[in-house]
Image: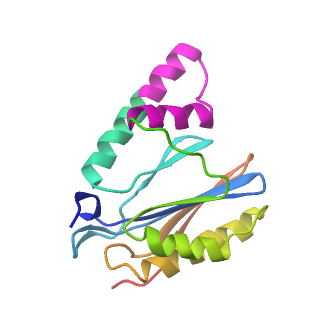
């Protein structure tokens, strides 16, 4: 088993019409043993930037702390929040590789193969926030049902220019 699969995870993010959604599962495990059922994989950097990290939980927490530190330094120097594109470049620089910016959706975690298939079949362009929430939720829940290392419901954020809606999904609890 790869160290990236040790804790299990499922992350998905989709773009809609003037909005985006990011969702993750809530299970933290050590291989097949469940440790927590309310683990938070999505972090808010500021009102327009959310970060979802999969992989080994301790590495994800360390990376998150480094990114928050860099964002706070930027705020002190520039007296404003980072633009999403600037933050994406910061993440790419910290991870030592150039990432392609997706125009529709991205997936990560141990459930990424089933997430990719679900997103491919459910995604359509210019979805309104409610339709985007439904699509992301259905893709996440159907995918974590096929992955024994992720699950226990989901956590979904839908971000529009005026508001951030956070919702908890109930899923299979086995």
Q: Give the range drawn in magenta.
A: 70-95
Is residue 43 shown above or below 168? above
Q: Determine the residue positioned at 53% across, 22% down.
A: 75
Q: Does the magenta run of residues contain 35? A: no
Seen from the viewer's position, the closer of residues 1 and 81 is 1
Q: Main secondary structure of the magenta part?
A: helix
39 on left or right of 20: left
**Residue 60 visible at all:** yes
Is residue 171 shown above or below 54? below
Q: Determine the residue positioned at 38% across, 41% down.
A: 64
**Residue 170 visible at all:** no
| Residue 1 x, y percent position in the rendering | 20, 67
| Residue 143 x, y percent position in the rendering | 48, 77
Which quadrant of the view contains residue 166? Answer: bottom right
Q: Determine the residue positioned at 51% across, 21% down.
A: 74
Is residue 44 shown above or below 85? below
Q: Which residue is outermost to the top?
A: 77
Q: Does the magenta run of residues contain 74? A: yes
């Amino acid at each position: 088993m790869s160290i990236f699969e040790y804790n299990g995870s499922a992350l998905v993010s989709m773009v809609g019409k003037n909005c985006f959604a990011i969702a993750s599962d809530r299970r933290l495990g050590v291989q097949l043993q469940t440790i927590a059922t309310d683990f938070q994989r999505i972090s808010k950097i500021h009102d327009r930037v959310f970060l979802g990290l999969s992989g080994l939980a301790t590495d994800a927490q360390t990376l998150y702390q480094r990114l928050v530190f860099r964002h706070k330094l930027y705020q002190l120097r520039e007296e404003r929040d980072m633009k999403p594109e600037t933050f994406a470049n910061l993440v790419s620089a910290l991870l030592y590789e150039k990432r392609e910016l997706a125009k529709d959706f991205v997936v990560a975690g141990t459930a990424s193969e089933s997430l990719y298939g679900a997103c491919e079949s459910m995604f359509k362009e210019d979805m309104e926030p409610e339709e985007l929430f439904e699509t992301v939720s259905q893709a996440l829940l159907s995918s974590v049902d096929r992955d024994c290392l992720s699950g226990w419901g989901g956590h979904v954020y839908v971000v529009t220019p005026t508001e951030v809606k956070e919702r908890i999904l109930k899923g299979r609890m086995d």
